[in-house]
Amino acid sequence: MIPVVLSGGSGSRLWPLSRAHYPKQFIPLASEQTMLQETLGRLQGLSAEALSPLVICNEQHRFMVAEQLRELDVLAKGILLEPVGRNTAPAVALAALAAAPDEILLVLPADHVINDIGAFHSAIELACREAEKGALVTFGVVPTSAQTGYGYIQAASEGVASEGGLVAQRIQQFVEKPDLATAQAYVDSGDYYWNSGMFAFKAGRYLEELARFQPDMLNACRAAFDGARVDMDFTRLDKAAFSACPDDSIDYAVMEKTDNAVVIPLDAGWSDIGSWSALWDISAKDEQGNSCKGDVLAVDTHDSYLHSNGRLLATVGIKDLVVVETDDAILVADKSRVQDVKTVVNQLKAQGRSERESHRKVYRPWGFYDSIAANGRYQAKRIVVNPGARLSLQKHYHRAEHWVVVQGTGLVTRGEEELTLAVNESIYIPIGMKHRLENPGRIPLEIIEVQTGDYLGEDDIVRFDDQYGRAEEK
């Protein structure tokens, strides 16, 4: 069995904490570990093969994926990079092409919470036995309430296999997200489960069904996979071939059409944390029903989710609200309206605002930078470079840079010069000059950078050499 972890989501309903360049799967929301790390951690105890997952993500997130795997000492079977998003059906096709036909793929989104690991493992064991017989298995979450934010799966009355109280059932139909009255009727009937988006099947069986129902998709994925190249720990797919691939989910492309689909009930404390209210539901609460994260002072406040990412957050006389503070944005929302946070994100996108994509603090493979001040003609950043790491050899057409070292030692390439800077020493990089910053020491290098010029965008970077493979990107 090969776990296939899908890590391509944007988590827009958890804005402003989740951003396009730093989505919810990379954030510690339900515990001290990130959601991706929790997904990998709950595979412990299944099999030796389960400890070597295949992760599928986009190119922007590749170094975060690699770093979070490294923190867990997880050696991935592979990290496949999607050059463009094409939904779950093509992503799983790539995983199937990377596996042997008889290997079972356990497909897991990277942003779920599952509290009962024992029940989760039992469901997986039954799913693998059904997959060995050629079935395409999905996991249906036993609903605890009528929810309009989930799709549903209606199971047939008869089971095809059972073990330890679990029953694998034929699927009657998949249904879209319902209104509240319909959702309540589904729950009352006992025949419907929440659609979890988790699957298990043999790689070859999935490709056979994809060939039946979506041959163009399979052909595009084969071309993208055949044209892939290895770049360090990553497999880069052929962009032109994958861009031509149809965009569709597993449900629409295969599961709703095949006559070999079965559903296994999963009653394991599952949540996809698809909204701030869902996170409030699963979080620990105080005597007033508040879930408080960070530096929070709540006065006469009840049944609210309060999250401070840095500054003191104080509330007085509120109820049933979500208040989330970050460095560059604050969200205040009625807890019953949090599904509409996506509307805010769409408006930010339409206005071309950076708050949709990135936090003030932006992670890079060499460390991170924090934009601490800016106007139209200058920008100040705090830059931290990890020990042994270095930035690309680069130049800028529109800005000059001034660097001051405040911690550690910096090795600077400036044109044909190479200089070492200690604490309190500084250097000036003129417009158009090739330069590089490196940390040769054993502690993080921290500098303050002041940029000046007529354009200060991150796309004003021409890379000549880069150990992280970004010199080829545009």
Image (tube, rainbow, N blue to C red):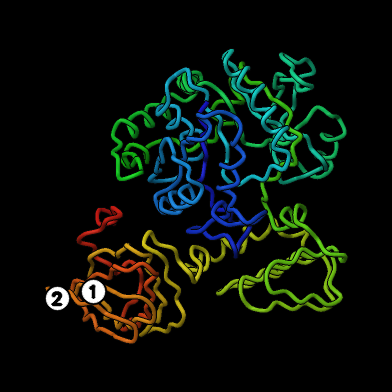
Tags 2 and 1 in contact by the CB under 8 Å rule?
A: yes
| Residue at image location 72% in from the left, 22% down from the top | 172
- Residue 137 figure quarter: top right
Residue 292 position (above or below residue 431) = above
| Residue at image location 67% in from the left, 45% down from the top | 113
Question: Looking at this rendering, what residue extends furthest in the front direction?
Answer: 442
**Residue 96 coordinates in the image, percent (x, y):** 45, 27
Amino acid type of the residue tagged 1 in the rendering? Val
In the picture, measured across the screen, residue 355 lies left or right of residue 368, that is right
Q: In the rendered image, is residue 129 in sight?
A: yes
| N-terminal-most mark, 2 or 1 | 1
Residue 155 has which mark?
A: none
- Residue 438 figure quarter: bottom left
Q: Residues within 10 Å of mark 1 (few under 14, many from 20)?
A: some
Nearer to us in this view, 231 or 94: 231
Pointer 2 residue: 417
- Residue 458 figure quarter: bottom left
Quadrant in which the C terminus appears: bottom left
**Residue 404 coordinates in the image, percent (x, y):** 33, 83
Q: In the rendered image, is residue 453 in sight?
A: no
In the picture, measured across the screen, residue 313 lies left or right of residue 60, that is right
**Residue 429 coordinates in the image, percent (x, y):** 23, 80
Amino acid type of the residue tagged 2 in the rendering? Glu
| Residue at image location 62% in from the left, 39% down from the top | 42
Q: Residues within 10 Å of mark 2 (few under 14, many from 20)?
A: few
Q: Secondary structure at mark 1?
A: strand
Pointer 1 residue: 412
| Residue at image location 75% in from the left, 41% down from the top | 269
